[in-house]
Every structure is written in structure tokens, then in C-alpha cells.
Amino acid sequence: MFRRVLFVLLTFTLVFSAAGPYAVVAKENKGEQQTQKLIKETEDTVVYQLVIDGKTYEFHESVKRLNEKKEKVKIKKYEVLDNKKKLVDTKVQFIEEQGEDLKITDGNETEIIQTAPSTKNAENQMVRAASYVTSSGGSYIADVRWKQYSDGDAVAIIPTDSKFTRTKNYQYRDFKAAANNVRSAEYDIATLGITGLLDAVVAAVRNGELISWTAAKRIAGKFAKAVPGVGTIWTIISYSQKVNAAHREFSHI
């Protein structure tokens, strides 16, 4: 309920904004290295590039329809360096409709993404009688957030874990910045004006999994009730990148 209320507030705040999904992508790339590039898209193939941690990767996705509700996606990830491509990862995903939700599993049929909202929260509830919270931030919707205390302690939080550290810890500061980026990216999804989309995307990236193009397209299409535009897909992928980055920074603390 709290997440849905936040979604309504975000949408209300941004309803007067003229920036659409294409404008959002253009704004993010203006004056900076292009971080997203769609090279090819057909009914059963998509090729695109993403810049992750300063490195350019090219993803090749091949889609095979297994039945009316399930499809198989083979994903090849290449690192691009000096116009040469090196295969660094290959994976298989299955995308299956389950009523109002989408279930995405890996090649071993182990669930990796579920668009149904989760209520899990791993925040450490340890009593801190000697200090009090002086500031907090990040995303309460994705549960990627931070708190800082009067004694210089801090806590970094993701849905499945939390870590106490010090505010001076540079790895904590990197996580804090990444968590704030997640919060900012939620406004981009809210501006799309698609009811239920933010909840579904947040649920899909909750474990820090990077969403594939095909998965983003299926999620957007299910809630938009139409074929989603390229800008909408990029907005979802960009959000998943930011959540993925926050989870990586958390692991470094």
C-alpha cells in the first residue's frame, strides 16, 4: 500500500511535465557518452549496447515462442573494445505470463524476476538508544536506501540485507549516491503515466537483476496494453541499471 501511495504522489507531481520517454533518454545522454544504443530490432531478435561501469557491452537477444504464454530468450553479452567484440557471457531466460504477473526464470527454471510486488524487508531493527537518525534517502519504493546517525554511523539497505558502517566509508558513500540515483530514475518511470508500471518494474529489479530488452518490452506491454515505444523500454532498462549498480556498490561495503 505504501509503495502504491508513493506511485500516485510521483505521478501527481509530474503530471504537468511535458517530458516524454524519448525526452528523458535524450536528456540523460546530452553532453555525455551515449550509454544506450539500439542497433537492431525484429520480431525475434534485438541487438543493443549499454555502457556499464565505463565499459561498452553489446547484447544479442534471440526470442523463441514456446507457447501462447511462454517464450525462451537467449542472451549473448559481448564486451566492445576498439571495434572488436569479445563474448563474456551467455544466458537463457524464460518469460511466462501468469495472470496479471510475469515470471522470468533462468536456464535451470530458477525464478530470477517476478513482477508481483514483494513485502520482504531485511532492514536490521537493532535498537540504537545512544544515537538518532540525522538524514536518510535513496528509494523507499525499491527499498534501496540509507540512513545516517548522529554518532557518525550509517546503514546501507537493500531488500535482502543491510549493513552498518561509518559515514566516512567511501564505499558507503558510493552506495549512497547510487541509491539516490535510483530514486531519481523513478520519476522517469512515473512520467510515462502507465498505471501499475512502476510497481511491476520495481518488483522485477528488486534483487538487482539487470532487465533484458525483451523482459522490459513484455513488462511495459502488459501494463500499457499496447506495443511499447523504444523510449519506454530504455527508461525501464535505465532504471534496472541504476538498481543493479546500487546492489553492486552495496556488495563492496
Image (cartoon, helix red, strand yellow):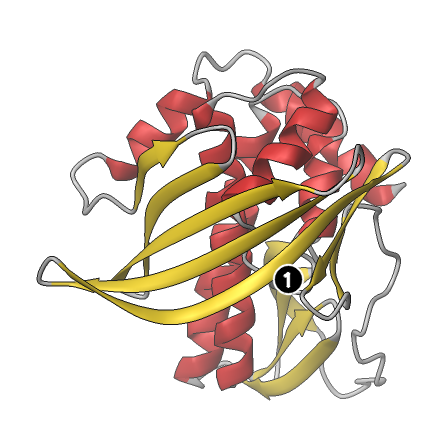
What's the residue at 16%, 38% (across, down)?
31
Res 115 seen here: yes
* Percent coordinates x, y for residue 67 in the rendering: 78, 38
Q: Amino acid at mark 1?
A: Val
User: Among all residues in the image, which is located at the extreme left?
Assistant: 82
What's the residue at 64%, 57% (across, down)?
93
Residue 51: quarter of image: bottom left
Q: Does 10 sit above or below residue 117? A: above
What's the residue at 8%, 62% (across, down)?
82
Q: Which residue is mark 1?
A: 144
* Percent coordinates x, y for residue 54 in the rendering: 25, 63
Task: Report crowding for label 1: few under 14, some 14 to 19, many 20 or more residues within 10 A (C-alpha).
Answer: many
Q: Is residue 215 left or right of residue 49?
A: right
Q: Is residue 244 left or right of residue 70?
A: left
Which of 34/215 is in front? Answer: 215
* Percent coordinates x, y for residue 1 in the rendering: 90, 41
Q: Does 45 sit above or below residue 104? A: above
Which of 22/123 is in front? Answer: 22
Q: Is residue 215 left or right of residue 199?
A: left
* Percent coordinates x, y for residue 201 in the rendering: 67, 43
Q: Secondary structure at mark 1?
A: strand
